[in-house]
């Protein structure tokens, strides 16, 4: 059992970095459209590992990404299932928005 637990921990660390690029690009593309600013740039604010939704459910990572450009700024939360090639980005609550 100890081997399985160790292998599980090792597996959850690596995908966070892999998903970071997809999460950031997903937020950036949404921000470019919503800000009407193709030259907008992303800034990663935070990363969190979320608990599975259901028993034996997949682990998810949450990335908070600010997108800034054309004198505007918006913050998104991108959620990715670990190891999945896709992420979903939604506007963060106003309380997450920090001054630029």
Image (tube, helix red, strand yellow):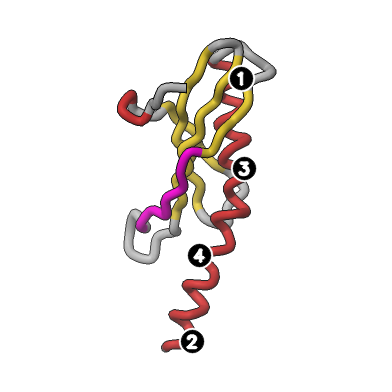
What distance separates the C-alpha of mark 4 from that of mark 3? Answer: 16 Å
Instruction: Identify the mark nearer the N-term, 1 or 2.
Output: 2
Residue 13 higher or lower than 67, as above or below: below
Q: Which residue is mark 1?
A: 32
- Crowdedness of circle 3 by 10 Å Cα count: few (<14), some, many (20+)? some
Identity of the residue drawn at 48% across and 74% down: 8
Q: Which residue is mark 3?
A: 22
Instruction: Identify the mark nearer the N-term, 4 or 1.
Output: 4
State which quadrant residue 58 falls in: bottom left
Q: From which residue to which does the magenta span run?
A: 45-51
Label 3–label 2 contact, CB within 8 A? no
Depth check, front residue: 44 or 91: 44
What distance separates the C-alpha of mark 1 from that of mark 2? Answer: 45 Å
Secondary structure, mark 2, is: helix
The total of numbered circles placed on residues is 4
What distance separates the C-alpha of mark 2 from that of mark 4? Answer: 15 Å
Q: Which residue is mark 2?
A: 3
Q: Which residue is mark 4?
A: 12
Identity of the residue drawn at 31% across and 28% down: 95
- Image coords of residue 96 (percent x, y): 36, 30
Secondary structure, mark 1, is: helix
Label 1–label 3 contact, CB within 8 A? no
What distance separates the C-alpha of mark 1 from that of mark 3? Answer: 15 Å
Q: Quadrant of the N terminus?
A: bottom left
| Residue at the front extreme of this rendering | 100
**Residue 81: within the magenta?**
no
Residue 87 higher or lower than 91, as above or below: below
- Image coords of residue 69 (percent x, y): 60, 17
What distance separates the C-alpha of mark 4 from that of mark 1? Answer: 30 Å
State which quadrant residue 37 falls in: top right
């Amino acid at each position: 059992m100890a081997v399985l637990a160790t292998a599980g921990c090792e597996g959850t660390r690596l995908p966070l970095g892999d998903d970071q690029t997809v999460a950031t690009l997903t937020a950036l593309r949404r921000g470019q459209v919503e800000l009407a600013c193709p030259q907008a740039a992303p800034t990663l604010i935070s990363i969190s590992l979320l608990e599975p939704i259901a028993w034996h459910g997949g682990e998810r990572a949450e990335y908070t990404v600010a997108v800034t450009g054309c004198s505007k700024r918006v913050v998104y939360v991108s959620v990715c299932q670990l190891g999945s090639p896709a992420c979903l980005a939604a506007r963060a609550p106003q309380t997450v928005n920090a001054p630029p």
